[in-house]
Every structure is written in structure tokens, then in C-alpha cells.
Image (cartoon, helix red, strand yellow):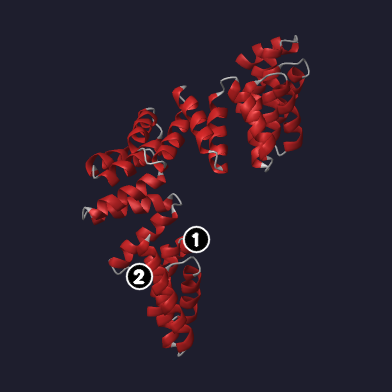
């Protein structure tokens, strides 16, 4: 009934009603008809409909035409279009033009554009200007900017102000800020409060927080509780948690299941899992596959894998190469200790 009322107004030429009809149709998954109404509204010069049409076209795999509509709306001063056009250009690698649109949107007070511009500048190494835009966005209530600003402040050694911004974002419900606040508090020795924030983020589904909570619980000797959180994070695709869960299973001598989790983590690029998988395989006399995983881990600079590769090569009578890997392992270990 509601959509029919808007359709009558839309058919009478009401552009706002056309956009509303399109939005209702999109909610029902009727994207083709939604696009038709967006086009009719956009054809009247309705800026919001141009942006909605661009979003719809992008979702339907028509980025070139989406770009055209974003650009039309942006050229006429639509700040959301400026920001979305910037994001599209950034994602396709056109950083210079993207920055230009982020700046135009940010200069009008668009907080998301401010935050994104700050991130772009930080990646480029322009830290002072990045800080300026992060602060403007954070002061305006942009929670993602609060988190990124906190990270930048921590990198500059200002943990006190970083904590302030993490708390503001965490109080606003940002799970990433809760996790970062937990890390900061843990490093300061405030383990109880760190656990509180980890739990809030983990309960809300943040995989990093789940894994970090597991690490904290393990350090307190609560191995069963730690394993529960490792498993939840691993099931969510967190590769370090897969490794940690595999480690927990290996300690319980559940070697087959441990190997399965090590493989998942190793396939995803987790170096420690590659090394531990090599150990399990060597114990089962699968020397060739163990060597493969040791070499992959060693190539990332893992000195334990380098040493284990040396041991394996000795077992296979390859003494000269084994000696080389022992030396590399020692050098890597010493470099790590010095840093």
C-alpha cells in the first residue's frame, strides 16, 4: 500500500517520490525497476537520485556509468557524491583525483571524507596534515577517525591522548576502538580493564579481540577459556587464532586436528603455522612436505623455521646446506633480539 501511494506521486512527476519508490524496490530486491525510477528522477536534475542511481549501478557491475552519475552530482555540489567518487577513484588506483574529491568534500565539512583523506595522507607519509584531518573529523564525532587518530598518536608516542580517543570511540560502540584500548591497557599493565574491553569487542563479534582475549586468558593460565575464544576467532577466519588454536590442540596431543588448523593458517600465510606444521609432518616422517613448509616460513625471516630446516636437512645428509640455514637462523635470531 505504501509503495503504491509513492508510485502515484512519482508517476505525477514528484522526483522525491521517485527516489523513495526506488529505495523501496531496492529493499525488495527489484533492482531493475528501481533503476528505472532512479533514472527518471535523475533526469529531472534530482541530485540525491543521481547518487542513488550511481550506487545501484556500481552494485550491478556497471562502474563506468556509476562514475558518470557520481561525477554529475559531485560537479553540482553533492558532498556525498564527492566522497563516493573519491572512494571509487581510490579503489581503482587513481589516488591523485581521489584526493582532490576527498578534499572538496572535506572542505564542506563532510566528516567521512575528512577521515578518509587523513588515512590517504598517512599512507603517503604526510603525518602532520593527516593528523589535522583526523582531529577535525574526530572532533566532529566521526568514530572511525577517532580510531585512526588514536593509532597515529600511539605511533608518535602519545599514549595518553590516544587512550582518550579510543575511549570516546569505544563508548560510541566501535569494536575496533575497544580492541585497541584493550591492547593499550594490557601493555600498560592494566590487565583487568584490558580484559573488560576485549570481552566487549569479542562479544560483539570482533575477531582480533577474540584472539587477544584468548592470549590474555592463556597468560593467566585459563587455558580452556582461552581455547574457546581462539576457536571462535578461528571460525571467523582469523589466521593467528587458527595458529593459536592449533597450538592449544597440539599441547593436548590432538595432533590430527592441530594439523588441520595449522594447514588452514599456513595456507593463509601465517608463518608460525607453517613452521609448526613442518614440525608435525617431520614427526610423521613426511620429510619432503615438512621441508616445503619450513622453507616457506624461513623465506619470511622466521629463525625457528630456518633452524628446523637445518635439522631436517642434516637428517637427509645435506650437511652443507644445513650449515647455511643454521647460520641464517642465528643471524635472524640475533637481529630480532637487537630490535
Q: Quadrant of residue 183?
A: top left
Badge 2 density bin: few <14, some 14–19, many ≥20, Cα 10 Å: some
Q: At x 76% / y 19%, what residue is drawn?
A: 40
The relative height of residue 13 versus residue 208 in the rendered view (above or below) is above
Which is nearer the N-term, disc 1 or disc 2? 2
Instruction: Establish if 305 lies above or below 178.
Output: below
Residue 150's spot in the image, x, y percent? 41, 36
State the image coordinates of residue 313 (x, y, percent, origin top left).
Answer: 45, 84
- Front-most of 114 and 241? 114
Q: Which residue is mark 1?
A: 269
Q: Residues within 10 Å of mark 1 (few under 14, many from 20)?
A: some
Asked whether residue 26 is in view, the answer is no
Where is mark 2, residue-wise? Answer: 255
Which residue sits at x=55%, y=38%? 126
Q: CA distance from mark 1 to mark 2?
A: 20 Å
- In the rendered image, is residue 207 in sight? yes
Residue 121: image location, x then y, percent: 56, 37
Q: Is disc 1 placed on a helix, strand or loop?
A: loop
Residue 117 image position (x, y, % from top left): 57, 33
Q: From the image, which quarter does the C terminus lie in?
A: bottom left
Nearer the camera: disc 1 or disc 2 = 1
In the picture, measured across the screen, residue 176 lies left or right of residue 15, that is left
> In which quadrant of the rendered view does residue 336 lie?
bottom left
In the image: residue 78, left or right of residue 166: right
- Dot 1 and dot 2 residues touching (CB under 8 Å): no
Amino acid at each position: 500500500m505504501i509503495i503504491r501511494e509513492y508510485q502515484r506521486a512519482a508517476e505525477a512527476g514528484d522526483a522525491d517520490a521517485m527516489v523513495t519508490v526506488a529505495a523501496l524496490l531496492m529493499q525488495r530486491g527489484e533492482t531493475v525497476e528501481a533503476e528505472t525510477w532512479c533514472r527518471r528522477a535523475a533526469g529531472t536534475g534530482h541530485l540525491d537520485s543521481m547518487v542513488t542511481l550511481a550506487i545501484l549501478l556500481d552494485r550491478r557491475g556497471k562502474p563506468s556509468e556509476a562514475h558518470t552519475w557520481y561525477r554529475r552530482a559531485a560537479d553540482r555540489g553533492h558532498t556525498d557524491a564527492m566522497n563516493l567518487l573519491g572512494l571509487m577513484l581510490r579503489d581503482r588506483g587513481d589516488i591523485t583525483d581521489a584526493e582532490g574529491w576527498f578534499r572538496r568534500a572535506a572542505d564542506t565539512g563532510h566528516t567521512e571524507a575528512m577521515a578518509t583523506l587523513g588515512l590517504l595522507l598517512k599512507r603517503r607519509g604526510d603525518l602532520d596534515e593527516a593528523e589535522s584531518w583526523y582531529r577535525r573529523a574526530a572532533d566532529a564525532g566521526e568514530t572511525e577517525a577517532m580510531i585512526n587518530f588514536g593509532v597515529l598518536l600511539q605511533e608518535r608516542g602519545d599514549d595518553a591522548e590516544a587512550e582518550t580517543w579510543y575511549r570516546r570511540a569505544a563508548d560510541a560502540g566501535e569494536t575496533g576502538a575497544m580492541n585497541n584500548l584493550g591492547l593499550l591497557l594490557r601493555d600498560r599493565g592494566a590487565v583487568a580493564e584490558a580484559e573488560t574491553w576485549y570481552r566487549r569487542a569479542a562479544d560483539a563479534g570482533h575477531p582480533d579481540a577474540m584472539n587477544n582475549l584468548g592470549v590474555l586468558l592463556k597468560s593467566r593460565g585459563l587455558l580452556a577459556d582461552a581455547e574457546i575464544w581462539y576457536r571462535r576467532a578461528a571460525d571467523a577466519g582469523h589466521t593467528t587464532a587458527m595458529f593459536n588454536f592449533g597450538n592449544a590442540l597440539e599441547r593436548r596431543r590432538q595432533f590430527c586436528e592441530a594439523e588441520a588448523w595449522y594447514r588452514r593458517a599456513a595456507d593463509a600465510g601465517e608463518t608460525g603455522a607453517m613452521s609448526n606444521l613442518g614440525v608435525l609432518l617431520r614427526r610423521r616422517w613426511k620429510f619432503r612436505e615438512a621441508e616445503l613448509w619450513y622453507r616457506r616460513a624461513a623465506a619470511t625471516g622466521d629463525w625457528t623455521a630456518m633452524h628446523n630446516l637445518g635439522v631436517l636437512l642434516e637428517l637427509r645428509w645435506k650437511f652443507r646446506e644445513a650449515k647455511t640455514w643454521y647460520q641464517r637462523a642465528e643471524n635472524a635470531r640475533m637481529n630480532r633480539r637487537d630490535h
